[in-house]
């Protein structure tokens, strides 16, 4: 009996040590690398998530998202404060059926030059790409007094799930590097990166679509920043290539909010031909954000809507939910419009 009691005490102590909690304290941390099954859109149902960015590596699809966090007073906020992202999350899957939650992989506060005085999070869309065994996290955050306005930062890691650290100690793109365009001090947001052979290209912008080549080190701009002229461009660009065709997919202004539109070109630095809309507006959401990946023989379009309720808190402009549907092309390589689903259509 004594040995049984002693063993129970040892197990209890080991459990406390393993979770980082002390006796009498609740373990409020969510378990890292927990798993869940896809049962229909939205993919993640226990958190509000936005701005999906898929990346395929070593037989898995990794999905990076911003964590839309609710706060008291959010529903009456304006001027960008209705969005509250203070961390970026990562999920992965080997088959689009079973998903792993890798938790928080990066925060705006991980960048020393970020603004840290506001009560509401100032972080927006991101994308992760791999090159030569390194994973580069391109993202958007509000700079401090030295770098006023929104800026594009880049962090790096040896693993797709981090930890990611600031790669250069300053913005990759700051407000002084681009003209103010249509959106002024917050036009430098929503980076996307395409690696095309030996070249790498960075595209970003709200109101104005900017494009620049990256140096081989992936952390410096190589040459001039140009403006890409595509119709009704708003934000959220996504670059990808299929065969010999380059695609620039983006959030455009449509009826009742943003829709996903796209253009094609024979080269990233060439002339872009508008091709119309891929989707209509997202349900209950003014914004929408594309992310595209080829995985296990199928192309997928990731986006967000605001059709999720968590603990009686409904979706809203700053409380979004990441979804996914199949994306197909016609014989000319043009995208076939995507119907936004709520069921498990991607598994059929």
Image (spheres, helix red, strand yellow):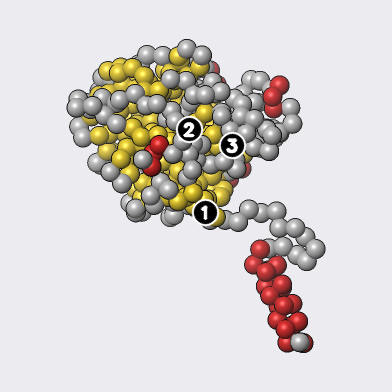
Residue 217: give x, y in percent of width and height: 36, 44
Name of the residue lying farthest toward the bottom:
2
Establish if 159 lies above or below 235.
Answer: below
Q: Earlier in the sequence, mark 3 or mark 1?
A: 1
Say what secondary structure mark 1 lies in.
strand
- The image shows a total of numbered marks equal to 3
Which mark, by number, is residue 35?
1
Q: CA distance from mark 3 to mark 2?
A: 16 Å
Which one is in front, 181 or 315? 315
CA neighbours of label 1 inside 10 A, class few (<14), some (14 to 19), many (20+) = some
Q: Earlier in the sequence, mark 2 or mark 1?
A: 1
Say which of marks 3 and 2 sits in front. 2
Establish if 341 lies above or below 255.
Answer: below
Say what secondary structure mark 2 lies in.
loop
Q: Earlier in the sequence, mark 3 or mark 2?
A: 3
The answer to whether residue 52 is seen in the rendering is no
Residue 193: give x, y in percent of width and height: 37, 36
Residue 215: give x, y in percent of width and height: 34, 39
Mark 3, residue position: 48
Residue 338: give x, y in percent of width and height: 37, 26
Mark 2, residue position: 342
* Residue at screen point 72% across, 62% down: 21
Quadrant of image for the C terminus: top left
Which one is in front, 207 or 56? 56
* Residue at screen point 59% across, 37% down: 48
* Residue at screen point 49% across, 49% down: 37
The image quarter containing residue 236 is top left
């Amino acid at each position: 009996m004594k040995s049984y009691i002693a063993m129970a005490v040892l197990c209890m102590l080991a459990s406390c040590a393993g979770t980082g909690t002390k006796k009498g304290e609740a373990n409020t941390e969510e378990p890292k690398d927990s798993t869940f099954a896809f049962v229909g859109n939205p993919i993640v149902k226990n958190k509000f998530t936005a701005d999906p960015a898929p990346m395929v590596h070593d037989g898995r699809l990794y999905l990076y998202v911003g964590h839309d966090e609710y706060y008291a007073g959010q529903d009456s906020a304006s001027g960008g404060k209705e969005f509250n992202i203070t961390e970026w999350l990562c999920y992965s899957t080997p088959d689009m059926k079973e998903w792993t939650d890798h938790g928080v992989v990066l925060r705006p506060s991980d960048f020393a030059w970020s603004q840290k005085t506001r009560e509401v999070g100032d972080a927006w869309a991101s994308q992760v790409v791999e090159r030569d065994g390194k994973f580069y996290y391109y993202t958007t955050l509000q700079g401090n007094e030295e770098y006023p306005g929104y800026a594009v930062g880049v962090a790096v890691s040896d693993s797709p799930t981090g930890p990611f650290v600031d790669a250069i100690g300053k913005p990759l793109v700051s407000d002084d590097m681009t003209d103010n365009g249509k959106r002024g001090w917050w036009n430098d947001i929503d980076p996307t990166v395409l690696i095309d052979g030996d070249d790498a290209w960075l595209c970003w912008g709200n109101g104005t679509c900017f494009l620049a080549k990256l140096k081989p080190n992936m952390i410096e701009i190589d040459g001039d920043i140009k403006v890409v002229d595509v119709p009704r461009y708003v934000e959220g660009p996504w670059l990808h290539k299929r065969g010999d065709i380059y695609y620039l997919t983006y959030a455009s202004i449509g009826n009742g909010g943003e829709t996903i539109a796209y253009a094609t070109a024979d080269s990233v630095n060439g002339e872009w031909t508008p091709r119309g809309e891929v989707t209509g507006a997202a349900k209950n959401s003014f914004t929408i954000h594309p992310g595209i990946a080829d995985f296990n023989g199928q192309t997928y379009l990731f986006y967000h809507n605001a059709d999720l309720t968590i603990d009686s808190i409904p979706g809203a402009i700053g409380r979004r939910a990441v979804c996914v549907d199949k994306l197909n092309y016609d014989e000319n390589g043009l995208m076939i419009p995507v119907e936004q689903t709520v069921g498990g259509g991607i598994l059929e």
